[in-house]
Image: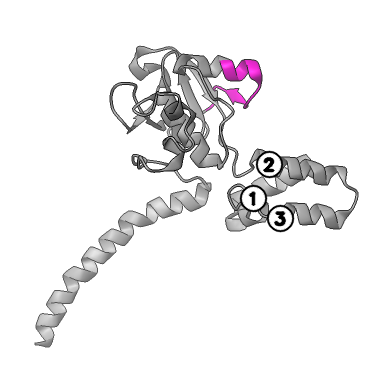
Amino acid sequence: MAKKKTLLIIPIVIIITIIISALTPLCAWAEENGYQPRLTAPNSSISYYSSAKNRYFQTGTPMPNCVAYAYGRIYEMNGEAPLLTHGSAGDWYFMNKANGYYDYGSEPKLGAVACWSGHVAIVEKIGKDGSVTISESHWGGTYFDVKTYSNMSSHYGQTFYGYIYTYNDGLTKSLERRLLNAKREENTQYKQEIINSPEQENGFSIISLDANREAVSKRDALLNRILN
């Protein structure tokens, strides 16, 4: 009888081990980078992608639509409405450049908007080999998919413009304003209260970035830049 129980336990242990092994790299990746990639389609009830908060949905161009998805994804990542609120995919890169909404460039970064002459997508992963994994939606086509490219210019044969660095690492404009207000104050205690205060829009507190070394480094650099 004991032998039978042992034989039953062994496959269960093996299955559990396989599941843990499969999940561990994903969890480690998320913790190491401090960025949560979206690799599955957003539920249509999520406010960032629905009529509740999505500007493109509200104006009659919801998903499947690359700009509607990118707008929702930026909102989801940052916890605040994107500064890019209109225009087609081909307009975004130069519209952002002209208005100075976000930094931009040719280097891929997590959470950035990859821009082509007729398409936009979000950078979700960057491989050690330089490959870029994007999440995207397609006007009049696929609701959501994820693809990996080694050469971004090969995407549908379109001209690749570059990246818009929309991901804010948890620093919303509201929190940035409070930090700038703290910078203008000479009272050290006041500064610390501002830094420690929770972000009203999404419950974020800059001190909560202590989750890992990279996050601590980002926090310290942020405080030095804004408060000093």
Residue occupying the point 68% across, 48% down: 219
**Residue closest to the eye, 161 or 170:** 170
Badge 2 amino acid: Ser
Which element carries disc 2, helix, strand or loop? helix
Using a 10 Å C-alpha cutoff, classify the residue at mark 1 as few (fewer than 14 neighbours), some (14 to 19) or many (20 or more): few
Q: Give the numbered dot on residue 172.
A: none
Using a 10 Å C-alpha cutoff, classify the residue at mark 2 as few (fewer than 14 neighbours), some (14 to 19) or many (20 or more): few
Question: What are the residue bounds of the magenta stretch?
Answer: 95-107
Q: Give the numbered dot on residue 200.
A: 1
- Residue 76 seen in render: yes
Which element carries disc 3, helix, strand or loop? loop
Which element carries disc 1, helix, strand or loop? loop
**Residue closest to the eye, 167 or 53:** 53
Badge 3 amino acid: Ser
Badge 1 amino acid: Gln
Query: Is there a contact, CB below 8 Å, between mark 2 and mark 3?
Result: no
Q: Which residue is mark 2?
A: 174
Q: The N terminus is located in which quarter?
A: bottom left
- In the rendered structure, does residue 152 fall within the stretch colored magenta? no
Q: Quadrant of residue 142?
A: top left
Q: Is residue 18 above or below residue 170?
A: below
- Residue 204: x %, y % from top left: 61, 51
Q: Give the numbered dot on residue 197.
A: 3
Residue occupying the point 31% across, 54% down: 22
- Residue 175: x %, y % from top left: 69, 44
Sequence-first disc among 1 and 2: 2
